[in-house]
Image (spheres, helix red, strand yellow):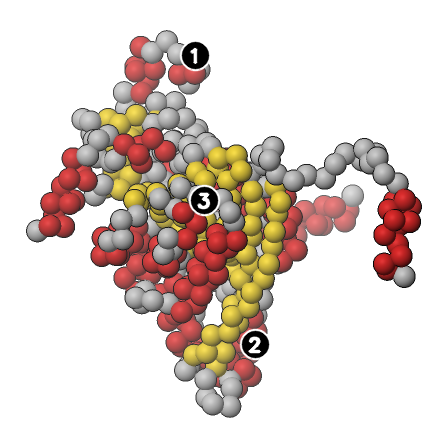
Amino acid sequence: MASGAAAAARRVLLLRHRNRGHQNLLPAQHFSSAAAADGLDGGDGGGRVKIFDRDLKRRHRDRAAWAMRETDALADAVADNLLDRLEDCRKAFPSALCLGGSAGAVRRLIRGRGGIEKLTMMDMSAEMVKKWRELDNAAGDGLETHFIVGDEEFLPIKESSQDLVMSCLGLHWTNDLPGAMIQCRLALKPDGLFLASILGGDTLKELRIACTIAQMEREGGISPRMSPLAQVRDAGNLLSRAGFALPGVDVDRYTVKYNSALEIVEHLRAMGETNALFQRSPILKRDTALATAAIYQSMFGLEDGTIPATFQVIYMTGWREHSSQQKAKQRGSATVSFSDIRKQFGSDQD
Amino acid sequence: MRRTAALLLRHGGGGGGISQALADMLVCPLTKKPLRYCEASGSLVSDAVGISFPIVDGIPSLLPKDGKLLEDHQEKSGHESSPRDSSH
């Protein structure tokens, strides 16, 4: 009992401490109870965990809409790889929905793949959607496009209305990834395809290390500067948890070379991929930032003076279930014995 | 000039502010129930929860944060006899 009381007292202390530290950062209701302090939103979120500040991410994407370059080699490579999968399917996908992230690159690189006739593009940021519409008007290749401002966590798409749902580097910012994927599955017609690419756990590991060392050195502690990202093994679980049939996961690793560490941050801003954690520290000291850049350069810099950054991209493929898809037969339904098969074909293997 | 004309055409298309094909595919993000286009306010209305979503520059904005509570929802749901509305 005594230890329990002590633990409770410590927890209250911790709560107070946290309360003071982040008062200016978070709305008051996040600390209304002990459970809320652990990152659970007791209010309208229905008790779900809030990790990312979606409003901040929306503003990041507003900024990215004018900061982004005409073409981005990384986004293009990922979008191209994603669209390439459409050519592996015999099916055509007349109506497609493309969610957030690098949908602009997807739109530009479709080039008639997958038999897409009608493309709906959705993002949280109105600025980003307007930018896509401008680019779409300029493209003029006769693809029917629609634009929506919407949230992946609250997908405003009618059930069973799409043949294909794509998301190119967007879903790693959702608080409720399984929920978002379930909504994607529901929006699909039976035998519809879900294709997504998200950033994986090895992404920007160099920056993660440099940030940690610099913060330890200059500030004597660390604050979360990087998102928690999904690992490859999580991706398979996510797909099956969301109820997709024939799940498939594969991983690709891209190394981008920059001239300086500051260029990495510029690139991340242009992609709208900067820190949006609820528990982030609102201050970045100048000397910590410079120390991070110096550590990055000295630890990971290459001989030719450039510095590499790793991006791990996880590609997820899943189908909405349909009777025409192959399935495992029920246990005990076999009519041929394995030993008979061996007798028949065994001679080849010996 | 041509772009303006195209924009005007798009705005004047079926379904009021947005094209019919798009309107057919949209549902309320919170309840997944159909939306109604309100011509007076130029917005999409979810009758189940009494929230209207704006259409800005021809793009429907269906973020739960952008939705506005309808003031006349209470009396309206009183008029309608559907059981779903009366439960609110």
Which quadrant holds residue A154?
top left
Q: CA distance from mark 2 to mark 1?
A: 61 Å
- Is A326 in front, or is B9? A326
User: Does the image show residue A40?
Assistant: no
Instruction: In the displayed orientation, state which residue is furthest to the left.
Output: B1
A349 left or right of A48 in image: right
Mark 3: amino acid: Ala
> In the image, residue A41 lies at what x, y percent?
52, 42
What's the residue at 40%, 69% (across, down)? A73
Q: CA distance from mark 1 to mark 3?
A: 41 Å
Q: Which residue is mark 3?
A: A92
Q: Which residue is mark 1?
A: B83
Q: Which residue is mark 2?
A: A213
- Is B28 in front, or is A49? B28
Q: Is A313 drawn above or below residue A163 in the view shown?
A: below
Q: Secondary structure at mark 1?
A: helix
Labels 1 and 3 touching (C-beta < 8 A): no
Q: Secondary structure at mark 2?
A: helix
Labels 2 and 3 touching (C-beta < 8 A): no
Which of discs 2 and 3 lies nearer the camera? The answer is 3
